[in-house]
Amino acid sequence: MVTKKYKNWNEIKTNDSWALFKIMGEFVQGYERMSEIGPCVSIFGSARLKPDHKYYKLAVSIAQKIVDHGYGVITGGGPGIMEAGNKGAHLAGGTSVGLNIELPFEQHDNPYIDRDKNLNFDYFFVRKVMFVKYAQGFVVMPGGLGTLDELFEAITLIQTKKIDKFPIILVGKEYWSGLLDWIKQTMVDTYETVGKDDLNLINLVDTEDEVLAILDEFYNQFDLSPNF
């Protein structure tokens, strides 16, 4: 309860007012640093997958190919799939960005982030703005609640036309098919709480070549190009 944390309502208002300056500072720092990175693709996924896991290895390979095609890579900066994304970008000699956030468990900087491209955030919502605003695509590997949060944030913003459309690519059919089947059968067909066309915003693949084919097709269609 709020009353356990604050002495009175005036103290709540004072703390909220000062927090605004910290929030503004995170936005300013993020905009200034991220505006200089060039076109990048955000890679999401579980912090819990180890380097010997097949999806960790696949994320490394995907990130390498993304860099080979002229894009940089943005991740959440932590371990697991985030580390794999930064590792692949680092090995390929490309831009490797980490958007870190302080958490009580799991999160710590990985060693593959470019030294001048490691940003730290206290607020999830500021961090999510940076992922969306400065990414030319989302590659979503198997992950947990945080990964789902970032995935559905992007889908919602595109579906409501609050941001321009960009590719959203789920990697791992065995992992994501059940979720997509539930969305189609329950949300679309049975309850009609989601439009059928909204499913077209999501791509489901298994390989790094499929990821790059979707990115290339999308940006060739709009006559756009990455960092070449």
Image (cartoon, helix red, strand yellow):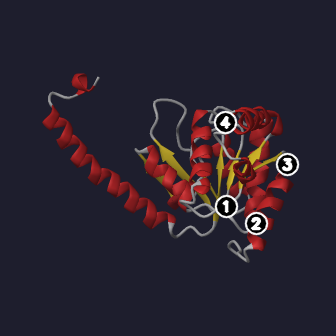
Q: Amino acid at mark 1?
A: Phe
**Category of crowding for the residue at label 2, using alpha-carbon neighbours closer than 10 angstroms: few (below 14), some (14–19), many (at least 20):** some
1 to the left or right of 215: left
Where is residue 104 shown, x and y percent of the image? 46, 30
* Above or below: residue 22 compared with residue 71: above
Q: Quadrant of the C terminus?
A: bottom right
* Above or below: residue 75 compared with residue 175: below
Q: Residue 207 has which mark?
A: 3
Say which quarter of the image contains residue 185.
Answer: top right
Where is residue 184 shown, x and y percent of the image? 75, 38
Disc 3 secondary structure class = loop
Q: Amino acid at mark 2?
A: Phe
Q: Which residue is mark 4?
A: 143
Give the Cα separation between the discs numbered 1 and 3: 19 Å
For the point 72% across and 74% down, the residue is 222
The residue closer to the viewer here, 68 or 174, is 174
| Front of the two marks 1 and 4 | 1
Where is residue 138 shown, x and y percent of the image? 67, 53
The residue closer to the viewer here, 56 or 5, is 5
| Front of the two marks 2 and 3 | 2
Q: Which residue is mark 2?
A: 218
For the point 73% across and 77% down, the residue is 223
Q: Residue 184 has which mark?
A: none
**Category of crowding for the residue at label 3, using alpha-carbon neighbours closer than 10 angstroms: few (below 14), some (14–19), many (at least 20):** some
Q: Residue 166 has which mark?
A: 1
**Category of crowding for the residue at label 4, using alpha-carbon neighbours closer than 10 angstroms: few (below 14), some (14–19), many (at least 20):** some
For the point 55% across and 32% down, the residue is 106
CB under 8 Å between discs 1 and 3: no
